[in-house]
Amino acid sequence: MAMRFPSRAGQLTHHYAEAVAALTDPRLSRRIAALHTLVLLGAESEAHRTAVVDVICAFLRTPGTDPATRETAGRLLRERLQPARAGFWPGMSVDLSGAVLADLDLSQCRVDGDLRLDGCVLRGQTRLRGLVVGGTTLVRAARFEDHAWLERATFGGPVWFNGTVFAGDAWFGGTMFGGSATFAGTSFHGHAWFGSASFDRGLDLGQAVFYRSAGFRGAVARGPVNLAGTTFHGPARVSRRGEEWNITAPGWEVVADDDNVAVGRLLWVGRRDLIEKPALVEEPTTV
């Protein structure tokens, strides 16, 4: 009777299960080897890539894992999301909700699906320069404990930063928001820079608090702007776009600079009960 050997797909699934189990091995070498095995499996089998990314993200969300293995997991994930590298994996979503992440760096990465950073604690500087997200970006109730660099990022879908705290500076210069951009209730404790950013579907800064300067010079808002209950403790700088100011809302006026009438600062002059909040997209459903 002829011997029957497992198919290649069956072998891959078996190796995948072994690698996942090895992530809890008490030996550091076995845990790191398991991560590399998962990535090699994904390189060979596109069908396993989503599962591999989900496992790596789940490992990073798990509290108490050792720094060396976490550093390896973060690096391998980042390399799979860099389109300039030969090992790029298109079509991925990334869910790091609730994770405690040190020095997160997704610069020049591309996430074709959704990016979830809800409830994250981001220690050290966070670098998302040039990041491209095709789907929805959720960064609600997160905390950036140091500076956050998001210049020239591109968000194709809606972006939610509701209730997030930026303890350091927040840099969004040149960032493109293809969907609605919501920063409702966000706290900016450092400088906030949105210079030359574009908001295609609206900008919601309702109840946001800016403790230092806020810069919107050169920004373009093609949708409604909500500044209901927004507090600027420092100057909020805007600029002219044609005959109009680029960022303003009911109850606010712009005081032009004496030496340059093309720029100015936002000043609250209205009554809060007269402000109508513009209609933006509905709050996403928590999954």
Image (cartoon, rainbow, N blue to C red):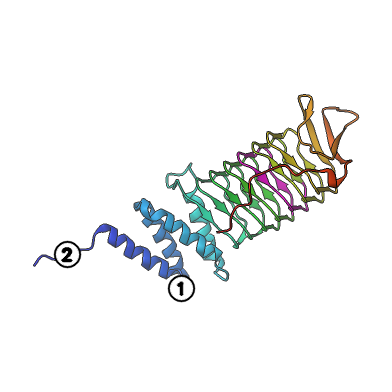
Q: CA distance from mark 2 to mark 1?
A: 35 Å
- Name the residue type under label 2: Arg
Q: Is residue 186 magenta?
A: yes
Residue at point 58% right, 60% down?
A: 97
Q: Is tag 2's residue or tag 1's residue first in the polypeptide sequence?
A: 2
Q: Which stretch did the figure color magenta?
A: 168-191
* Structural crowding at the residue carrying mark 2, measured as other residues with C-alpha within 10 Å and reported as few (<14), some (14–19) or many (≥20): few
Image position, residue 218 (x, y; %): 73, 32
Q: Report which quarter residue 122 is drawn in.
A: bottom right
Q: Return the residue at label 1.
A: 27
Image position, residue 187 (x, y; %): 76, 53
Closest to the observer, 198 or 129: 198
Residue at point 64% right, 60% down?
A: 119
For residue 221, side relative to residue 42 (left or right):
right
Q: Return the residue at label 2.
A: 4
Q: Quadrant of the C terminus?
A: bottom right
Classify mark 1: helix, strand or loop: loop
